Image (cartoon, grey):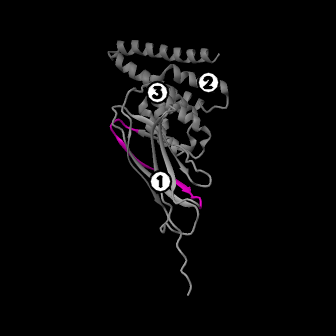
C-alpha cells in the first residue's frame, strides 16, 4: 500500500515535469530549466513531506518516508545532511542518522561524531555508532599503516596533587599520528591496575584524517591500593569494527603522596 502511494506521488511529479519540459521547450526555454524546476520540486517534497513524516506517530507513514529517501538518495541525502547540520541536537531524529549511515559517505562521519558527542541522551547511541561504522567500512582501504602514539601522559587536576583525598582526579593526555593515506575511525580506552576496583574508562571514539593527527584527553578518577607504590595504566586503541588492538601501551604512575603531618614538639 505504501509503495503504491509513493510511486503514485512520484509518477505524478514526473508527469508534471515532462509536461513542463514540453511547454518550456515550445516556449524557447531549455530542458535544463525544466530539470532545475523538477529538482526544486523534488527537494521541496522531501523537505516538506517526507522529512516530517520520519517523526510521524504512524509506523506505516515512517516506513513510507524512509522508502522515499532510500529510493531517491540524490534528492533525499542533501536534505538529510542539511537537517543534521541545522537541527538542534536534542531534537534530532534518529531515523535521519540511520538513513545517512545507509546512503552517505565516510566524509559524513566527522559531523556525525561531533553531534553524537553532544548528545545528552545515550538511548540511541547504538544507532549513531552503527551508522558511522557502516559509513567507515563502506569505503575502507585495507593495508594502511598503523597509527603512531607520539605522547601519553597523566596529569592531576588538583592544584595541590598531594591533597589528602584517596581518590584522584586526573586527565590522560595523548597525541596520535596517522601516517596512512586513508583515514582511521578508532576507539580508545584505558584501564587502571593496582587500584581497589580496577577502573576501566568508557571508550571514546575519534576520527584520524589521512596523514593527520589528533590531540585529545580522557578524564578519570582513581585511587591506589595502600600496599603499592605505583599504579599501572594500560592504554589501548582499536579500529572501529575490529577486535584486534592497533596499539597497546603501558605506563606506571606514581601516585602523589599525602603530606606528612608536622610532628609536635
Calculate the distance from the C-alpha at mark 3 to the C-alpha at mark 2: 26 Å
Residue 63: mark in rendering: 2
- Nearer to me, 250 or 151: 250
Asked if residue 127 lies left or right of residue 149, the reply is right
**Circle 2 residues within 10 Å: few <14, some 14–19, many ≥20:** some
**Circle 1 residues within 10 Å: few <14, some 14–19, many ≥20:** few
Mark 3 / mark 2, whichever is N-terminal: 2
Q: Is residue 123 above or below residue 174?
A: above
Q: Which residue of the protein is positioned furthest toward the front in this rendering?
A: 227
Please say whether residue 43 is visible from this viewpoint: no
Q: Secondary structure at mark 2?
A: helix
Calculate the distance from the C-alpha at mark 1 to the C-alpha at mark 3: 35 Å
Query: Going 43% across and 28% down the picture, which residue do you hit?
Result: 105
Q: Which residue of the protein is positioned furthest toward the right in this rendering?
A: 58
The quarter of the picture where the N terminus appears is: top right
Query: Going 57% across and 34% down the picture, which residue do you hit?
Result: 127
Mark in front: 2 vs 1: 1
Mark 1 / mark 3, whichever is N-terminal: 3
Residue at image mark 1: 252
Query: Residue 47, position in %: x, y?
Result: 51, 30
Amino acid at each position: 500500500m505504501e509503495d503504491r502511494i509513493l510511486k503514485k506521488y512520484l509518477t505524478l511529479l514526473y508527469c508534471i515535469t515532462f509536461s513542463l519540459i514540453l511547454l518550456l521547450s515550445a516556449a524557447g526555454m531549455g530542458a535544463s530549466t525544466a530539470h532545475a524546476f523538477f529538482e526544486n520540486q523534488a527537494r521541496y517534497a522531501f523537505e516538506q513531506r517526507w522529512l516530517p513524516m520520519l517523526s510521524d506517530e504512524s509506523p506505516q507513514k515512517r516506513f513510507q518516508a524512509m522508502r522515499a529517501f532510500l529510493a531517491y538518495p540524490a534528492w533525499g541525502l542533501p536534505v538529510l545532511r542539511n537537517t543534521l547540520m541545522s537541527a538542534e541536537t536534542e531534537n534530532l531524529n534518529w531515523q535521519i542518522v540511520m538513513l545517512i549511515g545507509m546512503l552517505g559517505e565516510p566524509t559524513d562521519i566527522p559531523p556525525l561524531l561531533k553531534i553524537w558527542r553532544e548528545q545528552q541522551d545515550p538511548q540511541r547511541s547504538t544507532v549513531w555508532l552503527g551508522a558511522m561504522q557502516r559509513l567507515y567500512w563502506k569505503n575502507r582501504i585495507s593495508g594502511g599503516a598503523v597509527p603512531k602514539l607520539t605522547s601519553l601522559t597523566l596529569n592531576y587536576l588538583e592544584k595541590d596533587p598531594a591533597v589528602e583525598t584517596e581518590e584522584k582526579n586526573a586527565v590522560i593526555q595523548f597525541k596520535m599520528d596517522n601516517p596512512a593515506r586513508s583515514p582511521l575511525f578508532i576507539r580508545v580506552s584505558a584501564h587502571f591496575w593496582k587500584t581497589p576496583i580496577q577502573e576501566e574508562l568508557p571508550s571514546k571514539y575519534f576520527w584520524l584524517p589521512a596523514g593527520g593527527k589528533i590531540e585529545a584527553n580522557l578524564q578519570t578518577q582513581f585511587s591506589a591500593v595502600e600496599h603499592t607504590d605505583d599504579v599501572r595504566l594500560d592504554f589501548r586503541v582499536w579500529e572501529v569494527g575490529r577486535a584486534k588492538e592497533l596499539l597497546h601501551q603501558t605506563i606506571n604512575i606514581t601516585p602523589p603522596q599525602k603530606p606528612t603531618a608536622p610532628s609536635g614538639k
